[in-house]
Image (spheres, rainbow, N blue to C red):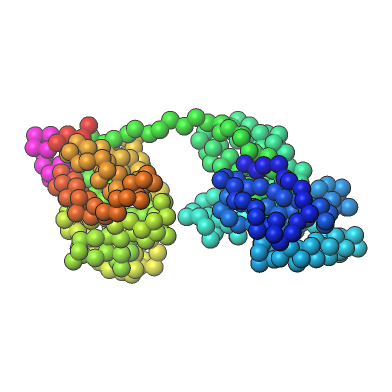
Amino acid sequence: MAKEPTKARLTDKLLRSLKTPSKGYIWCTDTHTSGLMIRLYHTGRASWFLRYTNPRRKVQSAKLLGDYPAMTLADARAAATLFRADLLQGKVSGANKIETIKDLISDYHTRHSIPNTRKPEQTRALYDQHVIPYIGKLRLDDFRRGDAVGLLDRLSDKGLGAQVNRVHAALHGALSWAVNSGLIEINPMAGLKRRVKEKPRDRVLSDTELRAVWEATAARSAPSREFVQMLILSMQRRDECRAMQWDELDQDAGLWTIPSSRTKAGRAHIVPLPTFAWEILESIPRLGPYVFTIDGKRPYAGHSKIVGALSTESAVTGWTLHDLRRTGRTGLSRLGVPVLVSELILNHARNDLERTYDLHAFTDEKRDALEKWGEHVRRVVLNSEVGAKVVSIR
């Protein structure tokens, strides 16, 4: 959260003495040059902004001039003076090139979502389907909290359920980026609560259900068969598994290394795959860089329909691919695997203190745990009498 801006005649000495806030950012307004301000973020970044009134629209705006110290105080004052002169002479059209919500979304998608997020196209689809058709033409300067409430009400009335929360998060993210880019002063959606209270999923497949699903996958063709089986055995996320590449696998060491660019946590993840998983991998022909692929050029993309088909074939209903991950995690607890090891297998983060003082990788511990799980799954899916010789995970 930003604090109220302070005012002073800025000097190089004063700028060097500014203290970085513990969170959010602080403003400092220059009394020497009208509208010139510096914003200091908790990250240590400092940026120059110019607050001005657009004579055409009679509204206040803020323009990002550059970052300090790359842009010095003298340079910032000169840039502010030049911009105001151009504004008065009509050389600046609209002041900000980003004038509407649609403009903002387009710029945000190109400059932020694509280079910094894992699924930019999925978020863009939310904008295109649920935001732009309704409020895309609204001017960014005129957008108010009521506009956001009206949009969310409209989507709720359409019965979109939890999808309304996804739209809320996407639009809030774009507006926060607009604040940090100096396009608007405040985020109109700040503090606006989500509409739908989502109930955490708790679906765990029993041994009998797990066997039925496995048998249904065995009746399908590659690569959907091996893809679902690998989800069960590795416990990794759907897209991490779906985009698995051959060069990530080291069979001699028994390791699958998922690069940081492909993990939800944004950090590389080492998975000591169990023997059962390697047996499945050895049966897959190498058609290209991807393990699960049809044409050898791109990863398997039939995952959106696979659950429906397997539910019909196995008579096991009410589950998702992510529930297989929860089933495995629950199974580890039933098999006596320590919580820390189980969480590391799922690539869940440890607290800051643990990460600082305990640098052990737990590779062997994860290997033992996944081997136990692999053998448990093998017994479940290959024995007709489920429950007689295995540890129940229900």
Which x, y percent locates residue 296? Answer: 35, 67
Query: Residue 12 sits in which quadrant?
Result: bottom right
Of residue 21 and residue 203, the one placed in the foreground of this image is 21
**Which span of residues is magenta-colored?**
377-390
**Residue 101 at least partly seen:** no
Q: Residue at x 65, y 58 (%)?
A: 16
Which x, y percent locates residue 61? Answer: 78, 50
Which x, y percent locates residue 321? Answer: 34, 44
Of residue 143 and residue 70, the one placed in the foreground of this image is 70
The quadrant in which the N terminus is found is top right
How many marks overall? Answer: 0
Of residue 114 and residue 222, the one placed in the foreground of this image is 114
Which x, y percent locates residue 80? Answer: 80, 61
Q: Residue at x 12, y 44 (%)?
A: 379
Up-down: is 130 above or below 239? above
The quadrant in which the C terminus is found is top left
Q: Residue at x 36, y 45 (%)?
A: 353
Name the side, left or right, on which 70 lies relative to 302.
right
**Residue 284 at least partly seen:** yes
In the current view of this chain or complex, which residue is farthest to the left? 389
Query: Residue 300 sits in which quadrant?
Result: bottom left
Name the side, left or right, on which 123 lies relative to 265.
right
